[in-house]
């Protein structure tokens, strides 16, 4: 696969994914990885998540924004994986909260869209690495990939 | 769930998993996450992987062994996730190679079990954090969890 096809396959993988794995750094600089719902995507450039303000990774990201987001399709043949590297912003402004809010979120955040325990995260990718049997390619991600 | 039940559910999640997500640190200390086949498990204590010696993450782990390994069962209701934190050793001794070698590996490593591009990784967990709706619990992992 050439770079154009790798970018196309990577975009599709992100678009189809419900779940991503997110790696952050703890206070000692050690990595930590967990699964999160990829709530919204802007092409390959930005991935939005929501989480509890009280979560360990929110404090970690406020201290150290470097993060990695991973998508994989293991059920497909051949399997495909994409690693993105970049930075995660912690957003608490009303517009960002509204952007990801959906009916049913009250179950988790009873005070509604401005519930202090509701936090929005926006990951901005700077590079990607795509894996598929026979292909392993790293590429830059810029604003044009949104 | 109390800690005993969390440990039991965590062990089951690891035992049932084919795939794990592995986070390592690059040369700048930034996190990077990818999917790998969890080839062998020793309870919650150790997870074995094999990979290409030439892979970026092998060089990263030789420099910086701190790593995190994640398992998730999204298809189950309620979904469950487990994050482990610890260290990943890069092993190239014959016994470790033999341990993970299976028929069919020649497809990837034509020179066989001692193919220089074949590398075995052994992750040793020091802590775990289990997630399930309503439960979020961190626990220590020691030799007794093997």
Image (spheres, coloured by chain):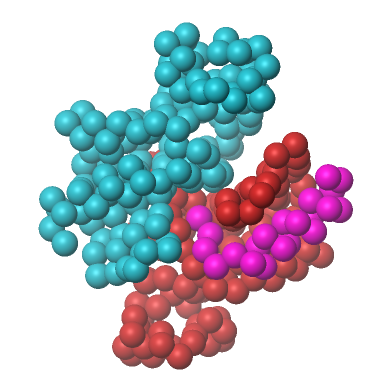
Chain colours: A red, B cyan
Question: Residue A79 in the image: x percent, y percent?
Answer: 64, 48
Tell me which residue sits at (46%, 15%) in the image: B98
Tell me which residue sits at (61%, 13%) in the image: B112
Q: Is residue B103 above or below residue A73?
A: above
Q: Nearer the viewer, residue B4 or B64?
A: B4
Q: Can the viewer see residue A94 in this picture?
A: no
Image quadrant in which you'd find residue B136? bottom left
Q: Is residue A58 above or below residue B28?
A: below
Image mark count: 0
Question: Residue B71 in the image: x percent, y percent?
Answer: 40, 49
Q: Nearer the viewer, residue A51 or B113?
A: B113
Magenta portion: prevailing SS class:
helix
Q: Is residue A3 left or right of residue A75?
A: right
Q: Does the magenta run of residues contain A20?
A: yes
Q: Is residue B45 left or right of residue A61?
A: left
Quarter containing the C terminus of chain B: top left
Question: Residue B123 in the image: x percent, y percent?
Answer: 39, 31
Q: Can the viewer see residue B101 in this picture?
A: yes
Tell me which residue sits at (68%, 47%) in the image: A78
Q: Nearer the viewer, residue A70 or B106?
A: B106
Tell me which residue sits at (26%, 45%) in the image: B11
Range of magenta residues: A1-21
Residue at the farthest front position: B103
Q: Is residue B121 above or below residue A72?
A: above
Image quadrant in which you'd find residue A9? bottom right
Q: Is residue A139 left or right of residue B34?
A: right
Q: Is residue A66 left or right of residue B54?
A: left
Question: Residue B5 in the image: x percent, y percent?
Answer: 16, 54
């Amino acid at each position: 696969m050439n770079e154009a096809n790798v970018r196309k396959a990577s975009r599709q993988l992100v678009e189809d994914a419900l779940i991503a794995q997110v790696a952050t750094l703890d206070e000692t600089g050690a990595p930590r990885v967990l699964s999160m719902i990829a709530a919204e995507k802007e092409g390959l450039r930005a991935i939005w998540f929501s989480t509890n303000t009280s979560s360990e990774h929110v404090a970690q990201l406020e201290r150290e924004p470097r993060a990695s987001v991973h998508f994989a399709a293991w059920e497909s043949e051949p399997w495909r994986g994409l690693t993105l590297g970049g930075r995660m912003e912690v957003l608490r402004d009303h517009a960002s909260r509204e952007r990801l809010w959906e009916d049913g979120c009250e179950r988790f955040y009873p005070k509604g869209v401005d519930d202090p325990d509701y936090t929005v995260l926006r990951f901005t990718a700077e590079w990607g690495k795509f894996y598929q049997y026979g292909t392993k390619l790293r590429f830059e991600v810029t604003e044009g990939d949104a």
